Amino acid sequence: MKGVETYQETAVTTQNKGKLVVMLYEGAIKFLKMAIREIEAKNPEAKGEYISKATDILFELNTVLDTEAGGEVATNLRKLYLFMGRHLSEANAKQDIGKIEEVIKLLEELNQGWKAIA
């Protein structure tokens, strides 16, 4: 098992920045889909954990934005990440699958753009 963990860590640390962003988006999407399944299964604790993981990813993406170098694109991404974070907070409190699906859609669109760049 240690070999698998080492491989995963190495895979993450050797990817270029564009591929890392794609991996982060894909992780957030995966966690949000899992959160939806947990809402449907009436398991609020697990739902909260998955939404929290996706929110952590959004927080990290927001934190590393360079608004000086990225200009308007970075500023707009920041606004979008903050919007998605608020949306997920509301979804978590209200068990709102629709809000989670909206965030998934936004993340999927962003992910397609990053995949084209990376």
Image (spheres, helix red, strand yellow):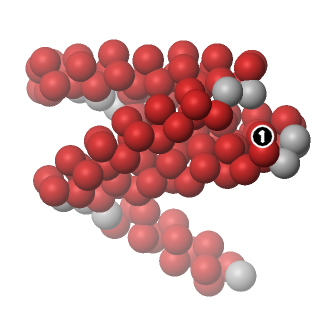
Q: Quadrant of the C terminus?
A: bottom left
- Specify whether 30 is left or right of 60: right
Number of disc labels? 1
Residue located 87% across and 41% down the image: 42
Please identify the quarter of the rendering in which residue 92 is found: top right
Residue 81: percent from left, percent from top? 40, 25
Q: Is residue 71 left or right of residue 63?
A: left
Q: Residues within 10 Å of mark 1 (few under 14, many from 20)?
A: some
47 and 63: which is toward the camera: 47
Name the residue rendered at 74%, 19% in the picture.
93
Where's the N terminus, which quadrant? bottom right
The residue located at (74%, 20%) in the rendering is: 94
Quadrant location of residue 77?
A: top left
Q: Which residue is mark 1?
A: 39
Residue 21 in sight here: no
Which x, y percent locates residue 51?
Answer: 66, 36
In the shown orientation, is residue 36 left or right of residue 102?
right
Of 114 and 103, nearer the camera is 103
At x 64%, y 17%, the residue is 90
Question: Does residue 4 lie above or below 108 as drawn?
Answer: below
Q: Where residue 43 sits in the image (x, y, percent)?
A: 87, 42
Name the element at disc 1. helix
> Is any atom of residue 97 visible in this view?
yes
Relative to 96, is 55 on the left or the right? left
In x, y percent, where is residue 13?
A: 40, 61
Whether residue 113 is situated above or below residue 56 in the rendered picture: below
For the residue marked with disc 1, what is the amino acid?
Answer: Ile
